[in-house]
Image (tube, rainbow, N blue to C red):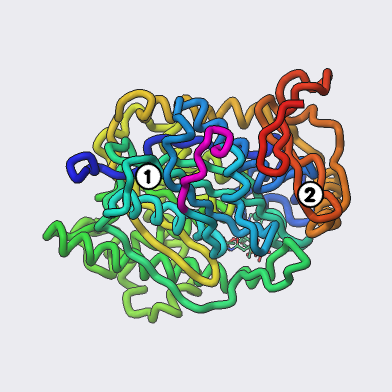
Amino acid sequence: MESQRQNVGILAMDIYFPPTCVQQEALEAFDGASKGKYTIGLGQDCMAFCTELEDVISMSLTVVTSLLQKYGVDPKQIGRLEVGSETVIDKSKSIKTWLMHIFEEYGNSDIEGVDSTNACYGGTAALFNCVNWVESSSWDGRYGLVVCTDSAVYAEGPARPTGGAAAIAMLIGPNAPLAFESKLRGTHMSHVYDFYKPNLASEYPVVDGKLSQTCYLMALDSCYKRFCAKYEKLEGKQFSILDADYVAFHSPYNKLVQKSFARLLFNDFLRDASSVEENAKEKFAPFASLSSDESYQNRDLEKVSQQLAKQLYDIKIQPSTLLPKQVGNMYTASIYAAFASIIYNKHKSLDGQRILMFSYGSGLASSLFSLKLHMGEHPFSLSNIADVLNISEKLESRHVFSPEKFVENMVLMEHRYGAKGFVTSKDRSLLSNGTFYLTEVDSMYRRFYAKKSGSEDAGETDVSCENGKLNAH
Ligand code: ACO
């Protein structure tokens, strides 16, 4: 088995996001925010959201079914399935058990793994678990599957435009086109109250927005230092941001990504990386003696760093911003949506390149890690992954809601959260074929889902998941 276990990583990916969204420009006007606050200030274009028909379970069912079908993977070949999510639908029953619907139908109930939760970091914990499993002595030769699924919603107020929703599935195994550099991981974990969900009756978090921004940057600094130290020990040479071809950040909103990349450049200056240009050294020099705490609050440093980083940002970061700017914060799926955007935009030129990844979950848990890319072989090739992701078409086929309709939907979802004994709307016209949707929550809080089949109007061929069976009716 040892010889088969080279280049463990991501073999295949797919993404699903709801077909319903609201434009940030319209939302900022509706909210009475100053013009440009959401679009330029936060750097966001559009925000996806779930209607009453969709949730983290339905999105996961949709994306996993789609991945297995599009890459021709036999469900019996999955030996581990891990889900990362912070959207709590049930305090005991994992989302993973819901996904067993798909596999039990094929006689496969021999699948390890459950859900991982810590804000936006759960997907990375799930991914590390799967990669570690394939690299371990308990690996049985089958694939791992990771699902990141979240509906990011906030109460009315400044955080609301930083929502979003999506599910991403990633197939894990050896000889992957997206291979982990497993020895290169820098992690920083700490106890803070920057964003948390103590009110179990509400889907909304309690959030200290300003603190969360600082915590994010502190975690980035710490992870980057550790990552560089590991690289330098292993490779015997200095690491700088120039050694990464692209960087995918957890993207709550684009402005924080702009600041974060600029911060990496400042880190290279502080570490005296030989790659930092003379001009940058001169401009950073006045800030060299700031304490870390002072440096997070210093607006001049922020401005200078962003100016110095602008050219590299356009090359190394911009290709990752497509989905995060269009879909919004997808919590656990956010960093992998940034990663998917790079593959979608650049797949023809990624052979041999390195992508650095920064995963952040409030509370807090964070890691910086890297992947090396290879063209791969069909169906597990970069070009096929880009085809399956099909991002432009998925974005273009969305339905834009007015802010009024969006808010109406949010109010309905507030009532539905934790509720029982209701059926959902019969109008599924906005969903595309193959999408799973919620039909009912019964008096015992049991949830029922169906799959839109294409003969919706006939109302006869939906597939429903009830009591562990996929039924046609
Ligand atoms: N035109 C252009 N830019 C503007 C305008 C305008 N009309 N108005 C404001 N801005 C800029 C501000 O200057 C600021 O940019 P800066 O940071 O470069 O100065 C930006 O827009 C945001 O404005 P703020 O006044 O700082 O925004 P506010 O405090 O109202 O809310 C926040 C922003 C804190 C991010 C809020 O949306 C939030 O709490 N979101 C959730 C928390 C979050 O996402 N944290 C990130 C890490 S944790 C996680 O992933 C959940």
Q: Please, what secondary structure does the residue beneath circle 2 have? A: helix
Q: Is residue 111 magenta?
A: yes
Residue identifier under label 2: 29
| Quarter of the image where the N terminus is located | top left
**In the orientation shown, which residue stands out farthest toward the left?**
236
Residue identifier under label 1: 316
Kind of residue at disc 2: Ala
Residue at 24% x, 43% y: name it: 5
Q: Please, what secondary structure does the residue beneath circle 1 have? A: helix
Residue at 33% x, 45% y: name it: 140
| Quarter of the image where the C terminus is located | top right
Instruction: Give how far across and how far down residue 12 sits, in percent.
Output: 42, 35
Residue at 48% x, 34% y: name it: 75
- Main SS class of the magenta portion in the image: loop
Q: Is residue 115 left or right of residue 367?
A: right
Neighbour class for label 1 at 10 Å: few (<14), some, many (≥20)? Answer: many
Image quadrant, ligand 1: bottom right
